[in-house]
Structures are given as structure tokens and as C-alpha cells.
Image (cartoon, helix red, strand yellow):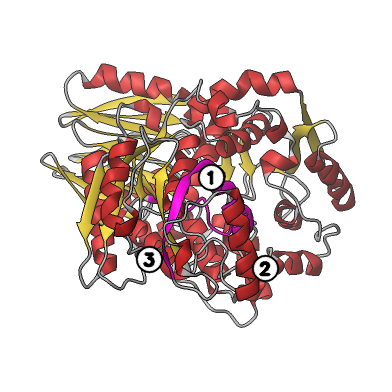
């Protein structure tokens, strides 16, 4: 894989060369620039599969791609194409079949291709290979830092640029495949995924958890030349576990023991590399970066196993849906930061768990297989891996790195990267939506607009009471508001209002206050997927009692409607502080309702919040 860029406008060569220089860590083997109609395209090579410099040009057609297509030889044989590597194969097939050819590719790719009249941008549907673009002037690049005002191309969309206009086409998500013997079929798919990704020599990011231990077992079975590597503080859980499991599996293990000053010295560099000051991203990226510095060329990673097999802590209601939601958003949460930090250390990371065949099997599994990655633990047991039952923490916690960055972490990290991507906040007026906004703002995400829907009198999807007063909240917070009335099709209006927010404010994600309603979150997630933005639900799966105790200390809100046994009319108009929260918790135990009102037992309205310039005054008789 490598780095690609293109720029179409005046002074294109100087601008393009500067962009490639900003991404020089993506390819140290070769740099090449070619002039094309109205601009130029460039390529940075990190050579793995043959040294064939790009860009590739054939008459009016041109191609530049950041790709690792693992089945390229099979495709070449099938279509009788002579090619020295996957790039030549992809270019020839695109000239023959157009962008539909990408359906044949197994692997990770981000491609720019032109047939003389149009420019096409397309990437793998998981979003492993990154790709960003801007419209005026038209440009594209592997990393956001390359040009000003780039936005990420959503993995399930292809883009067509023609005569100064763009068109995006949705390519669809994975559908899932039911199998008779899930463990056997997953074993076969994972073995093939590992086999396809093996190179002459490679490293394995190894924590000793079930994900990396399984990958190690397949590499051993395939006779691969590999060495494992673990990163962490002295005697951190990951290092202790990795040493133990490596001994049991007879694996060569390289330990990278970090010190506090070494980590803090690199924090600013990492924020700028990943273009983020989100603490979770920064801490996980530090693990990848320090490992990659010691892994030449190729390394295997277990990224994706938690997302598709139910390994995340808040996956407990509908695991299949929650795994789908996590996979949809993995491009924003994990793969980009891992990709960038891998290349910064000189390493191309490969992710067998994100192989399309593995994903299809995972989606088709019953929920019971996704309880804390049960199917992976069963597979590890069958394959004779000792220690497979041990549960490990996320990389930043298991390595100990999460203990190093000074608190409050968002404030400390904002010195290196002030603002993360622009978000729209879906606001109903109640405590949950405002607290979700507050969390993302505190994590340095830019809240570009508020999105609010005026529902019909009865709505399963939207909060009904006092939504019109969101205008006053938006004014108090100084955030632009997009408010629309809902018609018969509430899901359609939600999709359209998100599209409007994308066009007006260039948002790349939407945050909602969903806590446990699958009905609401599924429709929110689907709307984001169909409009090509990431979704954020920071409150999902929280303990409602703990949450209620916390939110009443950070926001001021009143109850505006009650609809549960045990909640009398006297609660309406009451401001909820710590003592009122305890009363609600007590009543919820007695009468069996959700303490945070997530089931519609009561509705709230926020009258003051950290972003408000002044509190909102309400006339109680109007409530």
C-alpha cells in the first residue's frame, strides 16, 4: 500500500508536491507525479508486491491507487490479464468493466480512476484504505492533512466528478451469511484470510488475547516467517499476558517497554498524524505507532475482532445489530488511525478479521455466538490455544498508556489538535441529547449545527414535548439550527435533514442521545449510513442509575411530561438535582420503570448547559 493524491486547479504541481510531502511517511520507496487534464496526480510507494511505480496512464485513461488486493492473481487468470502486480490488474480491469470491477477485489483499496470524461473515487467497503476529497478545487488524497478542507469519502459510497459537479452512489453494506457449522466455517474463512495476507516475513501485533493468539496459530500452521511484538509499560497486563501465551505457543516475542517520558514526547506527533485529539484514538494510536517503529514492511493486527464478534463492553442488547453498527463506523474509529500510525512507523498493517468472507459469516451468526466473542474462544479451544479464556482490556488500557496522558485528557490533547471533525447533534430538547452533545464537545469535536425534528403528535422515533423550544436552546448555545417538521415518513425526513446539514455545514458525523432504544438507534444508524456520515452514540449502554446521578450535576433540566406508574403530576415542572435523582431511582425500583426515563416514562427539557450563554426561563403553566 502507499499514498495517493490528485489536484485539479492552478499551480497544481507545487500544491500536489507539497501534499505528497505531508504524507511522505506513506511511501519511502518511490515518488512520482504525472500531469493529466486540468491537473496532476501523484503516488508514494511502499513496495510490497512488485515495484511498479504509479500513476498508470493509457491514452486518456489514468489510474492511481493505494491498494492491496489479495486475489489479484486469481482475477488476472480468470480474465486473461497480464499484470505484474495488483495495481496493473486493477487498472486494466477498470478500463474493461468500469468501477463495477471493484466488486471482484478481496482486500483493501482506495482508487482514483479516470476514463477521460469523468474521475471516479472508490474504496473498500470496510474503509481500511483511507480516501479524502474536496470539490472546489477538486482534489483527493490518502490523508486529511494533504489539502485544506478535505472530507472523508464514506466507504460504502463511490464518487463521480464531472464538469465541476460530484455525484455519489451508495454501494450497499454486507448482508451476512448463515452457515450450518459456524465454528468450522469461521475456521476456514480465517485461515484463508491469514493465508492471503502472508508475505515473505511479517510481524504480529500480539497481546496474548484470543484475537492475536488465533492469528498466531494460523501463521504457525501456514509456516509463515513471523515474529510477535507487544508494547506497553513495564509489567503492564499486555506484556505479562503476551509473555505467558508466547511461551505456551513457542512464539518469538519482541517486547517494547515504554517509559512515561517516551510516550509524552510522542503525543503531539500522534495527534497531528491522526488529525485528532480524541483521547481514545490518541492512546490506541500510540500503541500502534510504537509497535510499527519496530515492524519493517508488514504486520498483522487483530483490529475488527471486537467489532464483529461482540467484544465491546456496551454490546449487550442486540449483539448482531450492535456489531453491524460498530463495523459501519470502524473506518472513523479505528482503521484510519491504525493505517496512518502504521505507515508513520514504516509498516503496512493487515487485518484478517476484516476480510469480507469473515465479515459475512460474523453478521450471519446468532447473537449467542457474539457474547464476549464466544465463537472465537470456542475456536481457540478447538485449536488448542492455552489461555484463550483470558479477557483483555482495550490496547490503550492493557498497555498502560491510558494512565500516562495528564487529565483532563481532552484539554491536554487539544494543545496539539484543537478541533476534531464537524458533527451535527440530533437534539430533542431533553437531557440525553444535550448530554451526548456535551460529551462530544468535551472531546474536542466541533458541533457545527443542531438538527431537530418537529414530530407529529404521536411518534416512536422522536421526542414530542416542547421540541419547538429547541430554538431557544440553540440560540443560548450559539449553535446554528436546522429544524424540520416530520411527515408520515419520519425516517425519510431524518435522512433529508442530515443531508441538509452535510451540504450547509460540511458535517461528517451525527451524535444522538440514544441509551437503550434499539428502535430509535437503528433508524438513526440507518439514516447516517444512507447519507454517508459516521454516527456517534456516546450514551449507548450506560448504566441508567449512574448516568442519572451524573447528568443532573452537569446539566440543569426539568421534567415536562410523566407517563409511568409512580410518577405523579407533581413531578412535572420539577428541576432534577441530586436528591430528585435519588428519588427517581428509588421509584424506578419500586414500580419497575427505567430510572433515566429511556422508555418514555418521563420527558425532560434542558434549561441550562455548559455551552449556554444564559439559562432558559420557562413559564410553568405552559408546560
Q: Residue under circle 3?
A: 523
Q: Looking at this rendering, what residue extends furthest in the left direction?
A: 163
Q: Which mark is residue 334?
A: 1
Tell me residue 429's x, y (percent).
Answer: 36, 53
Q: Looking at this rendering, what residue extends furthest in the bottom direction?
A: 180
Q: Toward the viewer: 78 or 261?
A: 261
Q: Are marks 2 and 1 in contact (CB under 8 Å)?
A: no
Q: Marks 2 and 3, how far apart in space?
A: 24 Å
Q: Residue under circle 2?
A: 371
Q: Is residue 46 left or right of residue 120?
A: right
| Residue 190 visible, this orientation | yes
Disc 3 is placed on an element classified as helix
Tell me residue 486's x, y (percent).
Answer: 22, 65
Q: Toward the viewer: 196 or 311?
A: 311
Of badges 2 and 3, the one in the foreground is 3
Of badges 3 and 1, the one in the foreground is 3
Q: Are marks 3 and 1 in contact (CB under 8 Å)?
A: no
Disc 2 is placed on an element classified as loop
Q: Toward the viewer: 368 or 226?
A: 368
Tell me residue 122's x, y (percent).
Answer: 33, 49
Q: Is 100 in the magenta?
A: no
Residue occupying the point 48% across, 44% down:
555
Tell me residue 262's x, y (percent).
Answer: 70, 20
Disc 1 is placed on an element classified as helix
**Considering only vertical position in the picture, is 81 above or below 553?**
below
In the picture, the quarter occupied by the C terminus is bottom left
Q: Is residue 407 left or right of residue 81?
A: right
Q: Where, by quadrant of the figure, is residue 307 drawn? A: bottom right
- Residue interval drawn in magenta: 534-562
Amino acid at each position: 500500500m502507499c499514498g495517493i493524491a490528485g489536484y485539479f486547479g492552478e499551480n497544481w504541481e507545487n500544491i500536489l508536491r507539497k501534499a505528497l510531502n505531508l504524507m511522505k511517511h506513506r511511501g519511502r520507496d518511490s515518488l512520482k507525479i504525472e500531469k493529466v487534464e486540468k491537473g496532476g496526480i501523484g503516488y508514494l510507494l511502499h513496495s510490497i508486491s512488485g515495484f511498479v511505480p504509479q500513476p498508470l496512464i493509457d491514452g486518456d485513461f489514468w489510474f492511481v491507487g493505494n491498494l492491496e488486493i489479495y486475489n489479484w492473481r486469481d482475477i488476472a487468470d480468470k480474465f486473461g490479464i497480464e499484470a505484474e502486480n495488483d495495481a496493473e490488474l486493477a487498472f486494466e480491469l477498470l478500463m474493461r468493466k468500469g468501477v463495477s470491477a471493484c466488486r471482484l477485489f478481496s482486500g483493501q483499496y482506495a482508487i482514483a480512476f479516470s476514463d477521460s470524461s469523468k474521475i471516479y473515487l472508490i474504496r473498500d467497503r470496510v474503509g481500511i484504505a483511507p480516501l479524502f476529497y474536496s470539490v472546489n478545487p477538486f482534489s483527493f488524497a490518502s490523508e486529511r492533512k494533504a489539502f485544506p478542507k478535505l472530507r472523508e469519502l464514506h466507504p460504502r459510497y463511490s464518487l463521480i466528478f464531472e464538469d465541476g459537479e460530484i455525484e455519489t452512489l451508495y454501494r450497499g453494506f454486507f448482508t451476512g451469511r448463515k452457515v450450518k457449522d459456524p465454528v468450522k466455517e469461521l475456521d476456514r474463512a480465517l485461515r484463508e484470510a491469514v493465508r492471503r495476507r502472508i508475505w515473505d516475513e511479517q510481524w504480529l501485533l500480539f497481546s496474548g488475547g484470543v484475537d492475536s493468539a488465533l492469528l498466531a496459530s494460523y501463521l504457525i500452521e501456514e509456516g509463515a516467517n513471523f515474529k510477535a511484538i507487544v508494547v506497553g509499560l513495564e509489567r503492564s497486563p499486555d506484556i505479562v499476558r503476551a509473555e505467558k501465551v508466547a511461551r505456551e505457543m513457542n512464539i518469538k516475542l519482541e517486547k517494547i517497554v515504554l517509559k512515561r517520558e517516551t510516550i509524552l514526547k510522542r503525543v503531539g506527533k500522534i495527534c497531528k498524524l491522526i488529525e485528532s485529539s480524541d483521547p481514545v484514538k490518541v492512546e490506541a494510536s500510540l500503541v500502534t505507532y510504537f509497535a510499527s517503529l519496530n515492524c519493517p514492511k508488514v504486520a498483522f493486527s487483530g483490529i475488527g475482532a471486537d467489532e464483529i464478534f461482540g467484544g465491546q463492553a456496551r454490546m449487550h442488547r442486540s449483539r448482531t445489530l450492535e456489531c453491524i453498527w460498530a463495523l459501519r463506523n470502524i473506518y472513523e474509529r479505528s482503521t484510519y488511525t491504525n493505517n496512518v500510525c502504521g505507515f508513520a512507523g514504516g509498516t503496512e498493517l493487515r487485518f484478517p478479521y476484516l476480510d469480507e468472507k469473515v465479515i459475512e459469516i460474523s453478521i450471519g451468526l446468532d447473537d449467542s455466538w457474539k457474547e464476549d466473542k464466544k465463537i472465537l474462544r470456542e475456536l481457540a479451544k478447538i485449536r488448542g490455544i492455552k489461555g484463550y479464556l483470558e479477557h483483555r482490556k482495550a490496547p490503550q488500557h492493557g498497555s498502560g498508556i491510558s494512565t500516562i496522558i495528564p487529565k483532563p485528557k481532552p484539554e491536554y490533547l487539544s494543545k496539539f489538535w484543537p478541533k476534531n471533525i464537524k458533527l451535527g447533534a440530533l437534539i430533542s430538547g431533553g437531557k440525553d441529547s444535550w448530554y451526548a452533545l456535551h460529551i462530544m464537545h468535551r472531546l474536542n469535536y466541533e458541533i457545527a449545527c443542531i438538527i431537530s425534528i418537529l414530530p407529529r403528535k404521536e411518534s416512536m422515533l422522536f421526542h414530542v414535548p416542547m421540541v419547538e423550544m429547541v430554538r431557544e436552546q440553540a440560540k443560548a448555545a450559539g449553535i446554528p439550527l436546522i429544524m424540520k417538521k416530520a411527515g408520515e415518513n419520519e425516517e425519510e425526513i431524518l435522512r433529508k435533514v442530515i443531508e441538509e446539514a452535510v451540504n450547509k455545514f460540511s458535517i461528517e458525523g451525527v451524535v444522538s442521545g440514544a441509551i437503550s432504544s434499539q428502535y430509535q438507534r437503528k433508524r438513526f444508524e440507518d439514516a447516517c449510513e444512507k447519507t454517508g456520515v459516521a454516527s456517534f452514540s456516546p450514551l449507548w449502554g450506560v448504566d441508567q442509575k449512574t448516568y442519572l446521578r451524573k447528568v443532573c450535576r452537569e446539566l440543569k433540566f426539568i421534567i415536562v411530561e410523566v407517563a409511568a406508574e409512580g410518577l405523579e403530576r407533581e413531578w412535572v415542572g420539577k428541576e432534577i438535582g441530586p436528591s430528585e435523582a435519588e428519588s427517581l431511582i428509588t421509584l424506578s425500583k419500586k414500580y419497575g420503570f427505567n430510572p433515566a426515563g429511556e422508555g418514555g416514562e418521563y420527558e425532560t427539557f434542558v434549561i441550562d448547559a455548559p455551552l449556554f450563554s444564559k439559562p432558559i426561563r420557562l413559564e410553568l403553566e405552559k408546560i
